[in-house]
Image (tube, rainbow, N blue to C red):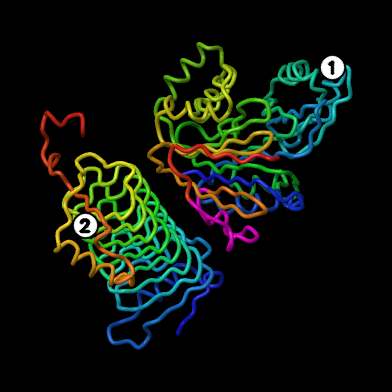
Amino acid sequence: MCGIVGLFLKNKSLEPELGNMMAGMLGTMCERGPDSAGFAIYRGGDAGHVKLTVRANSPKYNFASLAGEVSDAIGTEVGVTHHDTHAVFTVPTAAEAAARERIEAMGDGVKVVSSGSRMEIYKEVGRPDKVAKRFELQTMAGSHGIGHTRMATESAVTTDGAHPFSTGRDQCLVHNGSLSNHNGLRRKLVRKGLKFETENDTEVAAAYLTWRMSEGASLGEALEASLDDLDGFYTFVVGTESGFGVLRDPIACKHAMLAETDDYVAFGTEYRALAGLPGIEKARVWEAEPATVYFWERQ
Amino acid sequence: MPVVDLEATSLRSLNQLLHGPEEGTNETYFRIANPRGRHAVAVGLDAPVTVEIDGNVGYYCAGMNAHATVIVNGSAGVGVAENMMSGRVHVKGDAGASAGASGCGGLLVIDGNASGRCFISARGIEIVVKGSVGHMSAFMAQAGTLVVLGDAGEALGDSIYEARLFVRGGVKSLGADCIEKPVSDQHKCGLSKLLKEAGIGGEVDPAEFRRYGSARKLYHFHMDNLEAY
């Protein structure tokens, strides 16, 4: 099972509604993945700064104090916005490495979930509609986002095991399906220097894309290459700074519906997830073709 | 004429209502509003009633249908009319994967396209798709007829048994043990009858179709065929 949703807005006037629309879509997919959920949202951002999404084990964690320590460490004031167990730290791009080092030295479950000029990733264990509410997804504005509801099959139900997985700056991956060669591939990637936090198969797919891109492949090329190197069932949705992409394996057992209007492109594992979107009655709705890379990008 | 609004009535109540009609009843027409992609709408019908659904449905709509006519004024998700025994299912839009899977009888008409694995493991159902069908359609189909007015995707008829496939457009590739076969007058006659039942008799010329079926080489294990299994 597992459910995926994605929404890419073509009409900028809908941007204030992005989170609200996504929350509705994610809520509909609760039955497909009731154990945990997550989403990546793309909003704001400027060239000189990077957003680090940081998570802790408890919503009571003192992020303000951590932000103070990071500010001291890098010698610049760090912006911080708190969302339940997560917080977004805005730091000068040049100071990213130093800020990360300071944050990760905290231990105690404090981790950097993602980095990017526009991307923020939130994920937690629990029913997807409740997870979305905890992070107040319905209030978030943005240009596009992807979300996931998880029914764990490969590894434990933990926050780390929830999707999306970051594949690099401003890039993330969600997955419906299961990979059968992830252990072998993980060993290969470890030898190439990649680090893993979980036993999760999707983390391997994310690391695989990261590795391909570090070797010079574009995201599209990395996805194409995954058709040869990843064995198993999958529908992937990837988020990038400027848009999102979709890929299904050649057998295409894992469902994937797309809808497009003049205002948006939407992805849903099931049509139900799309049924509440404005103008869906007149949208072009179709099932994604197997082994075909789809991409939508902001101009 | 009962109209059931699925925003106000539970799916279970709807299906129980549709399972209710007994022989000789006057209530033979039901209309369903606001399906909004819900699964298992009008499943397991076993009476000669007509059910018209206004909107898109989710998975397994009209599954296990017997005797009833189900009309979807929209598109259908995975497994529409799967395991149909008899009756008629008409999807006015597109159909998701595995349309008519394992069907034993009845007629499924799809006005738009059907996705992958249409007519998979068919056992006697007849399907007419006015658009195209996706990959691995008619996989292991045993009996029945699939008619495609458009094109067929990759690996059509892989490991097929005795089902008949008629495609008017192109076929991306044939699956293992599926070959093109000559179209006899008898085939054209049967095809013409089926097109008429689907409501497009006279509009489409049976002579425009090519026929595909089993080469019957994979029925039994043979060492020389190992690569094809």
- State left or right for residue A103 relative to residue B72: right
Give me the C-alpha separation between circle 2 and circle 1: 70 Å
Residue B123: mark in rendering: 2
Q: Is residue A124 above or below residue A261?
A: above
Asked if both marks, 2 and 1, belong to the same chain, the answer given is no
Q: Residues within 10 Å of mark 1 (few under 14, many from 20)?
A: some
Q: Residues within 10 Å of mark 2 (few under 14, many from 20)?
A: many
Q: Which residues are magenta?
A: A269-286
To which quarter of the image does residue A214 belong? Answer: top right
* Nearer the camera: disc 2 or disc 1: 2
Q: Which residue is mark 1?
A: A74
The residue sitting at 46% across, 62% down in the picture is: B75
Residue B2 lies, in percent from the top left, at 46, 82
To which quarter of the image does residue A284 belong? Answer: bottom right
Residue B172 lies, in percent from the top left, at 34, 43
At mark 1, the secondary structure is: helix
Which of the two residues, A158 or B149, is positioned nearer the viewer here? B149
* Quadrant housing the C terminus of chain A: top right
Residue B71 lies, in percent from the top left, at 40, 71
**Three-letter amino acid code of the residue under disc 1:** Ile
